Amino acid sequence: MSLHRRDVVKTLLADRGGLLVVAGLGSTAWDCTAAGDHPLTFPMWGAMGCAAMMGLGLALAQPQRRVLVVTGDGEMLMGLGSLATIAVQKPENLSVVVIDNERYGETGMQETHTAYGVDLAAMARAAGFASGVLLRDAAGLSALRKAMREAAGPHFAQVKVAAERIPLVLPPREGALLKGRFRAALLGAGAALE
Amino acid sequence: MLQRHGFGLVGYVPDAGHKRLIELCQADSRMRTVVMTTEEEGVGLAAGAWLGGTKCALLMQSSGVGNIVNALGMARECRFPLLLLVTMRGENGEFNPWQVPMGQATPEVLRAMGVAVHHVASAAEIPGQVDASARIAFGSYCAAAVLVAQTLIGIKSFQEQADQ
């Protein structure tokens, strides 16, 4: 039985504690919002291909915090080089989870490369991630939850989900607001005076 | 100057003109250098770093400016501070015709995306312009670029580039 993206993201973000989250544009940003809008989630509305690198910048700036990037297969495919860049830096506190419906969801559900068998998890392992797993059922999710909170990364997971059309759950759109609320929640009110 | 402004991260795609600066940054225990596969990664890196409270500078060649245009939209919309140190190719003296179109378009492309641009044609100006550009970027929450003229870098042939 195939996984549903909203359930997967809700499971990953449940009891998030101090987790810092970057959500790639489109469906994964809506998934993270459906799990509960949070100042320490940075949902992207553009810059396709940049989500994993935003996670790297954040992970290097906050080595004592756990950082999770939740993004889609199309978004990850646009920034595949970042897998190599992240693997070189070896941030132990970073996890990249691709919610893989094998579709470009916002543009009419056209098939992405993963629909033809491109194995992102194998690419991450080959680049040098500490772990890279392909998950197709709920059995692996609890292990992934544990790894991204406790084990030394960088971790990568490609989670196959159903290609389904579901209601949009939109976060705030304004970029400066999203940036400001994230920095205030993480760094304190004084961050606005920096 | 990067030390004085407290940059903790430096992302780069190498250029011959940045060779010494990259080596200096790598030797500085207060900075972490990140080698990238494409300059676009740098905009994400710098944005994520700033979310986490760290300043990140980006080093690239002018051809790399062509690779970051869409990502600059995020920097502008979110008002992420961003400092770009760009070594120019495709200017007067260029020997490689493939460098000329992007090099000639670089200042206009950056300005079209809302980046404050300073073109530096003498070595003596560089520290002051890097200082000024870091100030406008981090004081005004915008992107700023220092373009270092090709005449300063002085590459006239592939052999000279290889010998650097």
Image: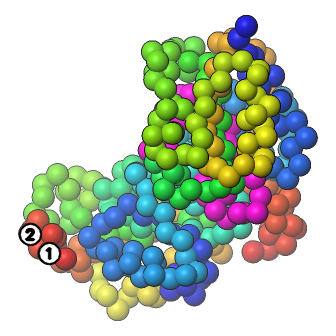
Vertically, is A110 above or below A147?
Answer: above
Would residue A2 be found to the left or right of residue B90 on screen? right
Residue B115 x, y percent position in the rendering: 50, 62
Q: Which residue is mark 2?
A: B159
- Circle 2 chain: B
- Circle 1 chain: B
Residue A107 x, y percent position in the rendering: 56, 19
Quarter of the C terminus of chain A within the rendering: bottom right
Looking at the rendered structure, the kind of residue marked 2 is: Gln
Quarter of the N terminus of chain A within the rendering: top right
Alpha-carbon span between mark 1 and mark 2:
6 Å
Considering depth in this image, is A175 or A3 the residue closer to the camera? A3
Vertically, is B96 above or below A190?
Answer: above
Evaluate if marks 1 and 2 touch, with contact meaning CB atoms under 8 Å apart.
yes
Would residue A174 be found to the left or right of residue B89 on screen? right
The part of the chain drawn in magenta is A55-83
* Residue at image coords 82%, 66%: A187
- Asked if residue B114 can be seen in this view, the reply is no
Residue A131 x, y percent position in the rendering: 60, 41
Quarter of the rendering containing residue B140: bottom right
> Which labelled disc corresponds to residue B30?
none
Residue B145 x, y percent position in the rendering: 45, 68
Q: Is residue A72 magenta?
A: yes
* Residue at image coords 86%, 67%: A188
Vertically, is A56 above or below B143?
Answer: above
Quarter of the rendering containing residue B149: bottom left
Looking at the rendered structure, the kind of residue marked 1 is: Asp
* Residue at image coords 24%, 80%: B152
Q: Secondary structure at mark 2?
A: helix
| Residues packed near mark 2 inside 10 Å, few (<14), some (14 to 19) or many (20 plus) | few
Q: Which residue is mark 1?
A: B163
